[in-house]
Image (cartoon, rainbow, N blue to C red):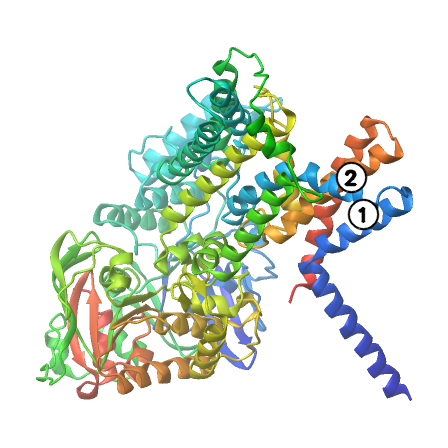
Amino acid sequence: MDNSHPLIEIIGISKRYGDVLVLKNINIDIYGGEVHCILGANGAGKSTLVKIMSGAVSPSEGSVLLDGVSLTLKSPRQAKRAGIVAMYQELDLFPNMTVWENISIDHLSSKMGVIQRRKIRENAEENLRTEIGVEIAIDTVVGKLTVSQQQLVYLAKTLNSSARTIILDEPSASLGEIEREVLHTVIKKLKKRGLAIILISHKLDEVLKISDKITILRDGGVHGQHATADTEMEQLISEMVGVQSNTSSKLRPTTIKISEVQKQSRSCAVELDHVSTDKLTDVCIKAMSGQITGVTGLAGSGHEQIPLVISGIMKPISGSINTKSGVSPKSLRHAVKNGIVYLHAERKIGGIFPTMSIDDNLMVGNFPNKFGVILYKMRNLKVGRLVNEMKIQGYHPGKRASQLSGGNQQKVLLGRCINRTFKILACAEPTRGVDIGGRKEIQMFLRQLVAESPEIAVLVSSDDVEELCEYADKIYSFVDKKVSGEFIVADSDKFEIQRAVLRTC
Amino acid sequence: MLIKRANDTEDSMKKSFYFMSWASKYSFVAIFLILVALSTILSPVFLTSGNIFNIFLETSILGVVSIGATCVILIAGIDLSVGGVIALSGMVAAVISSSNHGGPILGILAAVATGLIVGIVNGVATVYGKVPSFIVTLATGTVAGGLALLVTNGQPVYNLPSSFLALGGGNIGPISVLTIIWLTISVITIIVLRWTPVGRHIYALGDNSYAAFLSGIRVDLYTISTFAFCGLLSGLAGVLYASWVNVGYPNAGSSYTLQSIAAVVIGGTSLFGGRGGVGGTILGALMLTVFTNIFNLVGLPAVWQMVGYGSLILIAALLNHWLQQYRR
């Protein structure tokens, strides 16, 4: 294998969305037979870069060379043909087909137009056993496998193709301990064959263990490139986050400083007392009324579960949820009735009613009515008030919700929450997919909410630490399903919290 | 001069856009008016009061069934059990009404209850069995149709009591009782859908059921109730049908299943749920009858009637889809 020339060259790639420059002049060389990891905090531009390499997004400037030949990647299909395969978190497997059919779907060898089932099946089985080294019942329908197993099947499928470059986007986020080991072995095998492997991962210990080179992205630009052998975790964290770490924390990289929680005159609105679910382990947190409490972490670290638990959608296996009023939510409806409202992270899936009017979208769940008849005058009054309060732009009576921009849709959903009588607002990613102006307005709104009504507690889960620091009062960081730190935002600095999130224990 | 002309075209474009966006919401009104205009041209008898009352009378039973179908389709379901239920409940009503121990009132109540029960089964199996309503109602409709035959071993029930027949044969002024029942239920349903939280939540459920669940709406209860309502109306339609034709037929009503769905779709309700309403369904059902009526008045053979009938459904659906781009 000729390793003197890079297999993939990324030359001067920039990407602009409107006025925002997401990627600035990125140059990376990736050689065959190496695992190249791309690191970066949220919003550093990793996912855009991956999308460009896999053909899902085309760059504003610059080019990608494969073996010195410039590629014009217009679609993931073209990228696949060229030999670049991306493995995202959502796998494109066929859930109703068997494992062996999925592995060999791209080249079904046939004799006179009839596929040779037995031969293909045997090949697939062989492939799975020798290449991946796991036993998965080959006749099982893929939809019945666990996500981890599906990822291994997908790997086998990828190995069965003529791929020369594999992009792994957060591959171990949903893997169990054993599958993670398998993944690492497979990656090593692929390396030996001279494939280039591009790894996107947040898990620094994993990165240090299996990668050869590391490129750090920050604010859309390349901030540093290192050979893995010459780097340490502290250095990576500093470069990702932005400030040189002091040597004292380097000595004890896994202990996290927990800030002194000040005695608050405010009361605790909701408390999770040693709560465990299948995605949380022994979590204790408190959300005070009159405050915004943030929970954060990497994808899959467990912080996403907190709003679900508080609003009764996920029931704890052990531990208890205590609210000020003394009820612990048994179901979503029970929670809603007791003044806990929930905002879903994905507004398209769990929020917006696209063909209904904005007015109805705001009122759902709590139409002003008398004897079961809607009082339209009162409704219009309420809608008008909410539109003003939430600063919903582009509203006019009867307009469909799907015609609003993402940010304004999000404001509609928050408006729906506050249209109810509530004491606790549990929201997941309230600013996701919202432009910068809208973000600020939503943050301002949440701040105002707790300032004006001190009996209300707001709990926000978000994977954007930096943003959370701007408007939360207290932040809990999560690592591996557990609380890794508790911070009073006023007393701690941003970097400290970001470290707590990144550090894998 | 040039600028003025540019403004003019812009204005007229705006106007036509507003017209199109209105049409996109109420395309069924346009189709209805076109159909009525054509019919008026084709036959001088069409627009006489006698014929109009007749059209309303002939639409009534389809109309009643279609109200329930509209609600089910609004929550993105479908009810194929309508025809079977009509047959079964008609037989139940006929047998009990004409028996010595029963009587018309008991017969009607039993028939409506039969429909209600099938509806509840439909809802429960859809919600808790997680089987698509298409399959559930196909099955229950077949069962109901079979039971209808079983009641009298396939024999029709004649000689129904005259008080029972008053329902289907009676008039109040020039308007038949059937029409009054149909329009009354329609108006009540329109009011419920439009003016009550329950109604708005049915739309919400059809538009995005997960979001509805997260908003604290009792999705399961609403779904079962909607199917139950549709079953109840099918049961009532069975009674009305038996009373109208003076006979309890075990094979009655099979054509109503697809006709009710056609009426709903022509009336502008989306099969994906969350969009449409009973107002459109009234016109949709009327259109189907007008179509048959004009063919009869002009004296075209029944074969062409079927071809035209099918084309009408297709054209209405295509037009409706095409007009969606103008929706504001």
Residue A353 appears left or right of A153: right
**What is the x, y in percent for residue B241?**
60, 30
Q: Residue at x 17, y 79 (%)?
A: A487
Residue that badge 2 annotates: B291
Q: Is residue B192 visible?
A: yes
A218 above or below B86? below
Which residue was labeled with disc 1?
Answer: B35
Q: Type of residue at label 1?
A: Leu
Q: Quadrant of residue A275?
A: bottom left
State whether residue B13 is above or below residue B171: below
Q: Position of residue A290 (x, y in %)?
A: 22, 82
Q: Are marks 2 and 1 in contact (CB under 8 Å)?
A: yes
User: Does A413 sit above or below residue A487?
Assistant: above
Q: Position of residue A111 (x, y in %)?
A: 58, 22
Q: Amino acid at mark 2?
A: Phe
Image quadrant where one finds the C terminus of chain A: bottom left
Give the chain of mark 2. Answer: B
Crowd tier of the residue under label 1, counting other residues whose Cα lies within 10 Å: few below 14, some 14–19, many 20 or above = some
- Report helix, strand or loop for mark 1: helix
